Amino acid sequence: MSGQARLAFCAWAATLAAACALLPLVAPAGWLFQAALLLGVQSAVGAVVRRMTPAGPPAVAAQAVVSLLLLTFVFVRGHAVLGVLPGPDAVEAFGALLAQGTADVGRFSIPAPVTDGIRLLLVGGVVVIGLLVDVLAVTYRAAAPAGLPLLALYSVAAGLSPEGGSRLWFLCAAGGYLLLLLAEGRDRLSRWGRVFGGGPGTARSGGAAPPPVRNGRRIGAVALGIALVVPAVLPSLGGGLLDAARQGRGTGGGGGTVSAVNPLVALQDSLNQPDNRTVLTYTTDAESTSDMYLRIVALDRFDGTSWRPSERRITDLPRPLPPVPGLSPSVGTERVTTSFRAAGWYAQNWLPMPYPAAEVRIDGRWRFEPEGRTLVGDRGQTTRGVRYEVDSLLVRPTARQLSDAPAPSPQIIEEYTGVPESLPSVVAETARNVTEGASNDYERAVRLQDWFSSQGGFRYDTQVKAGSGSAAIARFLEDREGFCVHFAFSMAAMARTLDIPARVAVGFTAGASDGGGGMAVGLQDAHAWPELYFEGVGWTRFEPTPSRGSVPEYTQPDLPSPEQPDVPEPRPDDSAQPLPEPSDPEECVPGQGTEDCGAAAVPQDDGAAGGFPVGRALLVAAPVLLAAGILALPALWRGRVRSRRLAGGDPGALAFAAWRETTDSAWDLGITPQESATPRTAAARVVRLGRLEGEAAEAVHRLATAVEEALYAPRPRPAQGLAEDVRRVRAGLRAAAGRGARLRALLLPRSAVRAVWAVSERWSAVAGRWSGAVRRVRARIRPSGQRA
């Protein structure tokens, strides 16, 4: 093998050795063989061109072109010309794959699945690094600078790895670099001809390695040993790339600690995914899934820059789990069994499950963290494709039990009410203003929740920049727009300023029906919510985020049942006492007949037939009828608007009116419309949040399609049955909603606020015209006044 071919082979081997550091980040490892093949073709093309011409640029250009063609064929050949030539469609496909890969890197925990996007990042990155190494070390004979691309490749892997880069992968990368240096040194020496050693006239042409090569090997071995030993000996260098992982790994016994990677990195990205990819499916024996929040981890440490989980002790998984901390036997609970199955692509080492879990049946290396009652995978165990069953408790406290909750223990108060000094004073001031007049922590918590969800004028928007630090909370309170992260962090921080123990839970909402009797949880169901601690109840969920999840029953005001009006029951002694019989007057005036005396005992006729007091009844009934009429105005207005919208007319106008009626009907039942969403996205959201199935779900999508045709088609086709589709959707939404939600939608429909907005707009227009008229009058009067 020639010196140049040997050098090219060593460059290929050094790049693959450094790429091995990426193996712990993803699974499986088949991508590495693909990268090795592409690198081999790239190196061979460079060797062929270098034999044809000694100039460097032609070889570099040929390698770059061949690498691009190979990547095009492997990843986007369906969009390329003849399968290999990257045209505009192929470039667009490359961009989509790169965007998907970048999103997947932030979404998945380690080891991540090798999706198409991640595979492009891995293989493409290794090919680019290999090209740089080959150009520097082989084409331009500068092996020492070629170590910089290799170092960059290893540093990326070590920085992302939870272990910080193990010694094995460091040895692979460093060994490949030393091999490259030795090959380049040997090639340089070979140009000098024969190497002399020993004494004068003693030529060495074979046998043992020449002294310069032996010395180079010794120097390389000593340098590599120092690089491995010194960081382990010097405490000041601990925690670097070579530091073994001490967190998130069990020891196999009952000890160990865990410190989770912040799970909020991909939450916003998950919410903004156009495709609601299924994370897991489950079946449950619970009567309702509205409270089936699947908790992954609790964030309980707030340092001013972010909310993070504390480092906790982990133990072997007990069966059953220990009693729920802080939960009193007097609080009502219901045991629920739920069977889960995680998707094959969903891999993270924290197990989603309802809180609080009482028993978990699962295979694999799972450990238990008692404080958060969570399960964490040990030694690479992830949720990928796992099946498990959870017995959990539905805790049903009453408002009285939460109001009367005693003060928590000093340990709970100290650990879960601390806020950093960097927290702006506006957070505590706002918390005090919102909860002013509340007599206990439960009332304060409910007022905070209601202020965020409905009364404070906040707007749900997943495009707002994510943040969990003090500055982000203050900005959110000022701008009043954000998504679940902002609502949960802000409410938890404000609760802590009121000395209410609080933390933030991250996980998923209940999901939507899969059509087969189970539930499906997707990426767009990712969620964060605050948990507040009440002695006797334990950690209690609240829902401050509007249009997301479900508001707990124990935070809602009690409404009288429409079947049982609130009428006081008669006392037992009311019916026991007989009614007094009519009696004659005690005395009669002498000289008057019995008819006169009898007439004195009969009430005089006021002119009403049968003696009914019409005037008095009208006086009593008038206020009642007036109040009933005022209460019925929103319902009457909604009915009138609905009939007018569905009366027919132009196809495009009818489609818009039917769609507006659909979104308003969903709004009345608690699904706040998103004006910026496309009809298709809004339809999927109504189906998911409204738990629609069958014909109702199909009707929503038909209505969305009709609106899209009205918006974009040159001549919209007449849509048939839109009014009937609206009725199907309304029936489905009402069937899935609770009794209280239906009653509120009837008596106090949320969409009735549109009438207020219309009046406000007209008033503003009238006020604007009057203001303009007044200004014109003043402008005419002012000159004469000045002359005077």
Image: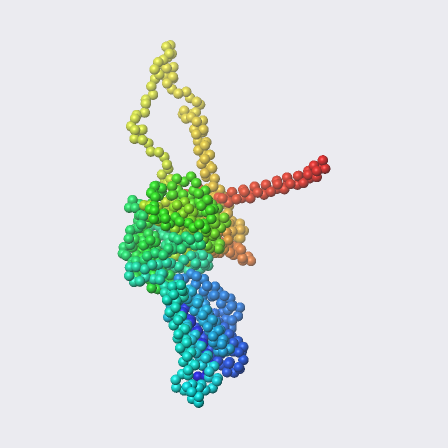
**x, y percent for residue 390:** 31, 55
Q: Quadrant of the C terminus?
A: top right
Residue plotted at (33% across, 32% down): 570
State which quadrant residue 784 falls in: top right
Q: Is residue 171 above or below residue 284?
A: below
Viewer-side residue, 605 vs 131: 131
Instruction: Name the outermost residue toward the front.
Output: 199
- Picture coordinates of residue 175, whole percent (x, y): 40, 74
The residue shown at (32%, 45%) is 536
Residue that appears at 38% across and 58% down: 260
Quadrant position of the N terminus in the picture: bottom left
Q: Residue furthest bottom?
A: 201
Q: Residue at x 45, y 58 (%)?
A: 269
Q: Is residue 240 above or below residue 595?
A: below
Q: Is residue 396 left or right of residue 653?
A: left
Q: How many marks?
A: 0
Name the side, left or right, on which 62 lies relative to 404.
Answer: right
Relative image position of residue 619 (x, y in whole percent): 45, 28
* Along the viewing direction, whichever of 111 and 659 lies nearer the viewer: 111
Residue 691 can be seen, yes or no = no
Residue 211 is situated, as x and y percent measured from the top left of the image, at: 42, 82
Q: Residue furthest right?
A: 787
